[in-house]
Amino acid sequence: MIRFRSVVFVIWLYGLVAVVGLLGTPFMLVSRKAGMTVIRIWASLVLWGAKVICGLKVEFRGLEHIPKGGALVAGKHLSMLDTIAPFTVLDYTCYVLKKELTFLPFFGWYIWRTRMIPIQRKDAAKALKAMVTDARDRLADGRQILIFPEGTRSKVGEDAAYKPGVAALYRDLEVPCHLLATNSGQLWPAHGIDRKPGTVVFEFLPPLPAGLKRGEFMTQMKERLEAASNALIEENSKA
């Protein structure tokens, strides 16, 4: 039954990409914020479909720590869901993402129009410089810059390496770093199509203050994200 519901949900998910993407195109052309509204509608419909079709609910905690206005957010990355759910609670999100996504139908159009930050991984030094420049511009525009320090989805329980891009943003933007923990990979795994019933929790943690030294920042960020995410995973395992 889980597999059948998961297949139906995958059809729902990518069907929404096409339908909402097409219907939202006129709004996307009007303005960047109108394009963001279309994305938020899409994300809300995805979460609704996950709940109705798969019994997978999404809960947000630590709402008092959600940043308002320009901010840097570092998130644990266990699932595709991590790139969808934050759109429904953050005011004006800007993702740091791989450039290959800009070539996808619909996704690429909205990435371009809403001025996300695509990075080319092949030339690390050039990509890092461009990412920081773009992030500074988006921060001045009042956007919440969301980056996944692991760079890609990791499996539950895996000791994933945290890449240095987030440290460059933290240093050059000179702002606190907000943290977003999750247990998403338990119910919506990094790979495969099965979506399991239960509750995925996204928890905003108290931010790390600006001005920490690079090593201290990286250590605290990883320790706090991993500890909070593991606590959510353990909580879900006992449910």
Image: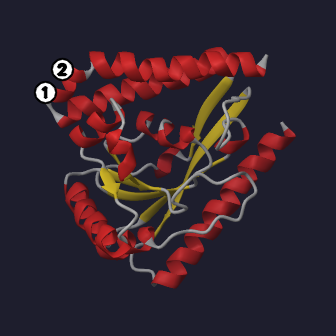
The front one of 202 and 36 is: 36
Query: In screen coordinates, is 159 left or right of 171?
Result: right
Residue 26 - label: 2
The front one of 223 and 207 is: 223
- For residue 71, above or below residue 195: below
Q: Position of residue 92 (x, y in %)?
A: 31, 42
Q: Residue at x 31, y 53 (%)?
A: 117
Amino acid type at image mark 1: Val
Residue 70 - label: none
Amino acid type at image mark 2: Pro
Q: Circle 2: is it few (<14), some (14-19), or many (20+) Cα within 10 Å?
A: few
Spatial separation of the CA atoms under disc 1 and disc 2: 7 Å
- For residue 96, above or below residue 189: below
Q: Residue at x 72, y 48 (%)?
A: 232
- For residue 31, above or below residue 75: above
Query: In screen coordinates, is 134 left or right of 187?
Result: left
Q: Residue at x 33, y 70 (%)?
A: 128
Query: In screen coordinates, is 113 left or right of 75?
Result: left
Please indicate, yes or no, whether residue 233 appears anywhere in the rendered image: yes
State which quadrant residue 101 falls in. top left
Q: Secondary structure at mark 2?
A: helix
Please indicate, yes or no, whether residue 54 appears anywhere in the rendered image: no
Q: Mark 1 and mark 2 in contact? Answer it, CB < 8 Å.
A: yes
The front one of 4 and 55 is: 4
Q: Secondary structure at mark 1?
A: helix
Q: Position of residue 23 (x, y in %)?
A: 28, 15
Residue 30 - label: 1
Q: Circle 1: is it few (<14), some (14-19), or many (20+) Cα within 10 Å?
A: few
The front one of 225 and 130 is: 130
Which quadrant does the N terminus fall into? top right
Which quadrant does the C terminus fall into? top right
